[in-house]
Image (spheres, rainbow, N blue to C red):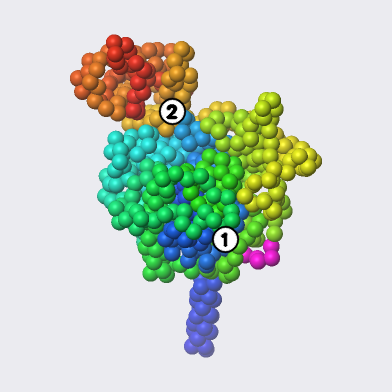
């Protein structure tokens, strides 16, 4: 009898084990996500979109295998686009409205896509260009990323990127980067360095679901590239076979042609690097379960082929805001095809959240909507909505370089007419994709509707909490010491009686204590001068003789807890007078 009972128990245990194994095997595997973005690569900087003069076989192949958004819209410039990607919101509601002058700092209170995915047990990595604030608590590691390898400021070698600025024409080679918040010296060309780090991140996290934000700074200027890639295009005519295609073509010069050759070389280098990354996914058996998104952040900076579109970087016309957007996920997106429904950068967060099962807080108000119905069903559509775009170095200026779109109809504010009245142009992109024919005169009703929506949108942006109260670095925490305040995140204001603007930082002091403050210079001082350091209502002054100084130090400066403004004003002797001079960056150690 006991033998029968034991046999029955054994059978039950085996059956239970088999069921457990079956359930384990049936458990869904969360998809990995790799979001790849390039900088200033225009819609026409790909072979796939009709450019015969650029070599992009890997991206062309990716496009052919992907779901492609034919009307994917971003901001006219990069930092605003990046904040919308990270938050699912329009940029100004996050505090970002520009690329420098203090306009590229994203509020740390914003919930990012990395934070959502961390909550869903993803490993998160950010590699390359961040451009949403270089100080705590706005750095990528403060905003949800487990692993970071990034440069500072808007771009490598720009003035905010103080570790590489003074290298001038070689800043893209062997750049100083920040790995998990620590300064590191790297070896190689920047795009190669970023790709190698990306492959290491994938290798290290192959057993976990991961989110990788791979953000190349190329082909943004300065246009520096390995000689091998320049040689590929040095004898190329970038306009060959394109000018007479029957579509508008920008005015080009020999300088813009040379710029195009360099850009093409930088893009081909990225293409070669993506081959390595995609091969890594295949080797590790991750390709089938990895969503790869490729996009760019805005239109091209220089005039060149852009598939006939009007405008380029900085413009709300299509050439500035329409970019490639390829979504490749073989496990779920079975059919490569074009989607004509307009989509936007802020749709990325809710789409990835739905795909991965990440939970968006119920009280989080975002502008984006999930694109999953379009991605998974060939006959799906989404309701029409208004999509607005703006850019001009400051909070909204009505009505300059601003657009509102509904379906194919797009209203553009283009400033003032000769009589000083607000001027608008209306386009039907379905019939006029190149925005050549203003139809506003015969469609006053649609102008009124779109302008009303434009006004409502501008009202909401102007009243955004983070536009009214700009995000601020926090000084004196354990998370960042010393703190380097760079020019990209500085604010500027007019100096009375001078064309020069005063540079300053609004910061928060975490606790009352003494700090050493060092003002760094971008060259050795070879002339006499003085430096005034204004801290709140107090001014400290040091005079110096031109003896090769590269920095000037103010030791043991007591700073009280709370918000304060730090403003260095420097003057150097020139032709018998003291001339205004910008310091390089400010170091605060405490």
Position of 302 with respect to 309 (left or right) is left
Residue at the image point whose x is 55% and y is 54% from the top: 307
Q: Which residue is the site of mark 2?
A: 490
x, y percent for residue 570: 34, 18
Does the magenta portion include 175? Answer: no
Q: Is residue 541 visible?
A: no
The dot on residue 68 is 1
Magenta span: chief secondary structure: loop
x, y percent for residue 186: 28, 48
Which range of residues does the magenta coloring cover?
Answer: 375-380
Name the one closer to the observer, 393 or 35.
393
Label 2 Cα neighbours within 10 Å, binned few <14 / some 14-19 / many ≥20: many
Whichever of callouts 1 and 2 sits on the residue coming sooner in the sequence is 1
The dot on residue 561 is none
Name the one closer to the observer, 407 or 473.
407
Label 1 Cα neighbours within 10 Å, binned few <14 / some 14-19 / many ≥20: many
Q: Is residue 53 visible?
A: yes
Position of 381 with respect to 182 (left or right) is right
x, y percent for residue 374: 64, 60
Residue at the image point whose x is 48% and y is 49% from the top: 304
Please, is residue 388 above or below residue 501 in the view? below
Q: Toward which corner of the image does residue 267 lie, by quadrant?
A: bottom left
The residue sitting at the top extreme is 576
Position of 139 with respect to 459 (left or right) is left
Q: CA distance from mark 1 to mark 2?
A: 38 Å
Q: Quadrant of the C terminus?
A: top left
Nearer to us: label 1 or label 2:
1
Q: Secondary structure at mark 2?
A: loop
Q: Toward which corner of the image does residue 515 lie, by quadrant?
A: top left
Position of 446 with respect to 525 (left or right) is right
Q: Secondary structure at mark 1?
A: strand
Name the one closer to the observer, 469 or 261.
261
């Amino acid at each position: 009898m006991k033998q029968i009972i034991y046999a029955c128990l054994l059978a039950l245990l085996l059956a239970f084990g088999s069921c457990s194994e079956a359930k384990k095997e049936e458990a869904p595997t969360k998809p990995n996500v790799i979001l790849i973005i390039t900088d200033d690569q225009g819609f026409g900087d790909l072979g796939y979109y009709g450019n015969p003069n650029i070599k992009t076989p890997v991206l062309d192949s990716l496009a052919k295998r992907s779901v492609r958004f034919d009307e994917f819209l971003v901001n006219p410039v990069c930092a605003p686009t990046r904040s919308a990607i990270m938050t699912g919101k329009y940029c100004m509601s996050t505090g970002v409205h520009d690329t420098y002058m203090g306009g590229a700092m994203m509020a740390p209170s914003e919930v990012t896509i990395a934070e959502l995915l961390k909550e869903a047990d993803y490993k998160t990595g950010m590699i390359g260009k961040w451009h949403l604030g270089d100080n705590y608590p706005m750095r990528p590691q403060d905003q949800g990323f487990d692993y970071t390898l990034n440069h500072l400021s808007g771009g490598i070698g720009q003035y905010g990127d103080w570790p590489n600025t003074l290298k001038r024409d070689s800043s893209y080679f062997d750049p100083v980067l920040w790995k998990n918040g620590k300064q590191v010296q790297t070896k190689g060309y920047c795009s190669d360095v970023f790709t190698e780090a990306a492959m290491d991140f994938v290798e290290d996290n192959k057993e976990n679901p991961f989110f990788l934000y791979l953000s190349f700074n190329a082909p943004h200027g300065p246009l520096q590239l390995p000689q091998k890639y320049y040689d590929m295009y040095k004898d190329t005519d970038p306009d060959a076979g394109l000018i007479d295609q029957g579509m508008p073509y920008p005015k080009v010069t020999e300088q813009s042609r040379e710029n195009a050759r360099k850009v093409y070389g930088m893009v081909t280098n990225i293409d070669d690097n993506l081959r390595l990354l995609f091969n890594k996914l295949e080797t590790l058996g991750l390709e089938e379960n990895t969503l790869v998104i490729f996009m760019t952040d805005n239109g091209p900076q220089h005039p060149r082929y852009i598939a006939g579109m009007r405008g380029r970087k900085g413009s709300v016309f299509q050439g500035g805001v329409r970019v490639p957007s390829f979504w490749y996920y073989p496990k779920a997106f079975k059919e490569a095809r074009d989607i004509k429904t307009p989509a936007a950068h802020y749709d990325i967060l809710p789409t990835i959240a739905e795909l991965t099962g990440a939970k968006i807080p119920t009280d989080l108000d975002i502008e984006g909507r999930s694109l999953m119905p379009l991605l998974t069903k060939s006959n799906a559509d989404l309701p029409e909505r208004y999509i607005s775009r703006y850019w001009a170095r400051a909070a909204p200026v009505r009505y300059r370089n601003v657009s509102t779109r509904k379906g194919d109809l797009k209203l553009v504010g283009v400033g003032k007419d000769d009589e000083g009245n607000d001027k608008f142009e209306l386009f039907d992109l379905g019939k006029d994709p190149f925005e050549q024919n203003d139809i506003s005169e015969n469609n006053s009703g649609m102008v009124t509707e779109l302008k009303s929506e434009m006004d409502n949108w501008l009202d909401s942006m102007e009243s955004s909490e983070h536009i009214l109260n700009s995000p601020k670095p926090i000084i004196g925490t354990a998370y960042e010491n010393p703190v380097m305040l760079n020019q990209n995140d500085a604010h500027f204001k007019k100096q009375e009686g001078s064309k020069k603007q005063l540079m300053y930082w609004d910061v928060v002091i975490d606790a009352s204590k003494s700090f050493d403050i060092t003002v760094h210079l971008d060259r050795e001082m070879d002339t006499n001068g003085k430096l005034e350091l204004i801290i709140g209502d107090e001014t400290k002054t040091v005079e110096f003789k031109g003896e090769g100084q590269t920095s000037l130090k103010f030791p043991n400066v007591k700073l009280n807890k709370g918000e304060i403004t730090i403003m260095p004003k420097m003057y150097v002797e020139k032709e018998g007078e003291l001339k205004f001079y910008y310091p390089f960056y400010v170091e605060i150690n405490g």
